[in-house]
Amino acid sequence: MLTSKREGEGRSVVAFVLISLVITSFLSTSSSASSDLEYQGSEPCLSIDKLSFNSTAANASITWQTDLGPRLPGSNSSAELRRSITQNLTQFTFEESSHNRENFTLTNLVGSFSPDNSTGQNIVFVAHYDSRYMAERDENESKRNQPIDGANDGASGVAVLIELGKIIPNLELNHDVTLFFTDAEDQGITGGFHPLTWSYGAYAWVENLTEEYKNNISAYIVIDMIGDAYLDFTKVKDTSGELWDTITPIAAALGMMESELDCEGNYGEPIYNPNTTRGVIDDHVPANNAGIPAINFIDINYGENASVFGGHWHTHEDTADKVSSESLGYIGNLLELGLITSAWTLNPIDTNELTNESNQDDNTLETNDDLENNVEKSNFVGYLSIIIVSAILILILVADISLKL
């Protein structure tokens, strides 16, 4: 009798569990099928006349930064640059965080802007503000152990973020924006394969994020080495494909793609090539590894006809005269236009909503009423099925209880 009772109880429990699983599965399926998130920016050309990024001021910032001297971690120049950033961007709330790495202490600077109507989503713009401690690629061997100016490799990204930060509070955004100035990105070891000796600051920041903070980041966009007077860049490996897809229409609108028409109907310059992908170890890697959607704007051909990671890169020729306000303007306008058009915010979509698609054979289209009827029928069948299955399982449960009584 004890065995039979346990078997009866077991059947009852099984029936109850099955009912719960079926109902839960249906509800979760309905929920997941009804909504999702994706980037849904508006048409760039409708907003291009609103651009206000000041490329001349960005160019002047590069000269000012390099005049400070090498911005090495822990240096007075580094501290002075951080002070200037916070003084210029008063509508941002800044925090510094220091971390011990190798034989130095790095300091990250993070500025946060959150409008009153913020959805909580956060777009993070990233640029390293340190300069290279050695010029290992310089032609003059006697100067290879000396730090470089870092006009393009360091100062250009910072200049763009500073000028972008000045106009962000006036863009009427409905989400948070973070300006992340990373330290010790460019203190890595060359020769051999030492990927973890680069991007110290970015790794330290990502490692200390809460899950909630990470989940609220809709885009993490790195800007590095984009001041080259001969600007060109491509997609970068170990980044978000979905986020990269948002760049093409913006770059085309601004005349940065020679195969696409800009907003005035002219073919653009050969600046952005979405069909080529290059590998780069930079501040996007820690974020991508942590599951944060990240991309990187970086020009790794520095100088006229420069080879990959050639030209003025990591030499004493990386000076303010090698960058241009026009190149800074291209990137600054791209970032501003992306913000204005909400290109990098994630919005819910209804995955049950059927779209009208052209039939190339007979050019027939389903009407909106037909689509709505199909959806309603599908929902009705689903609800009817769950009612029938649940009723059967309830009968099994009642029968088991009756037998035990």
Image: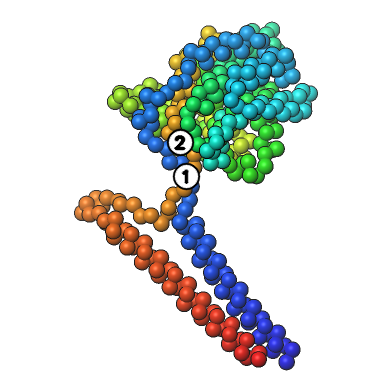
Type of amino acid under label 1? Asn
The residue that mark 1 highlights is 347
Callout 1 secondary element: strand
| Quadrant hosting residue 21 | bottom right
x then y, percent, for residue 45: 35, 29
Left or right of residue 329, residue 5 in this image = right
Sequence order check: which comes first, mark 2 or mark 1? 2
**Residue 258 seen in the figure:** no
Front residue (pair 294, 142):
294
x then y, percent, for residue 132: 66, 18
| Quadrant hosting residue 281 | top right
* Residue at image point 39% right, 68% down: 380
x then y, percent, for residue 75: 73, 16
> Are dots 2 and 1 in contact, CB under 8 Å?
yes
x then y, percent, for residue 304: 47, 14
Instruction: Residue lying at the far right in this picture: please name it.
Output: 103
Instruction: Residue lying at the far front in this picture: please name it.
Output: 116
* Residue at image point 50% right, 57% down: 32
Check the image and tell me how it is coloured. rainbow
**Residue 264 seen in the figure:** yes
Type of amino acid under label 2? Ser
Crowd around label 2: few <14 · some 14–19 · many ≥20 (10 Å)? many
For residue 342, the mark is: 2
The C terminus lies in which quarter of the figure?
bottom right
Callout 2 secondary element: loop
User: Spatial distance from mark 2 to mark 1, Cα to Cα?
Assistant: 10 Å
- Looking at the image, is 235 positioned above or below residue 35? above
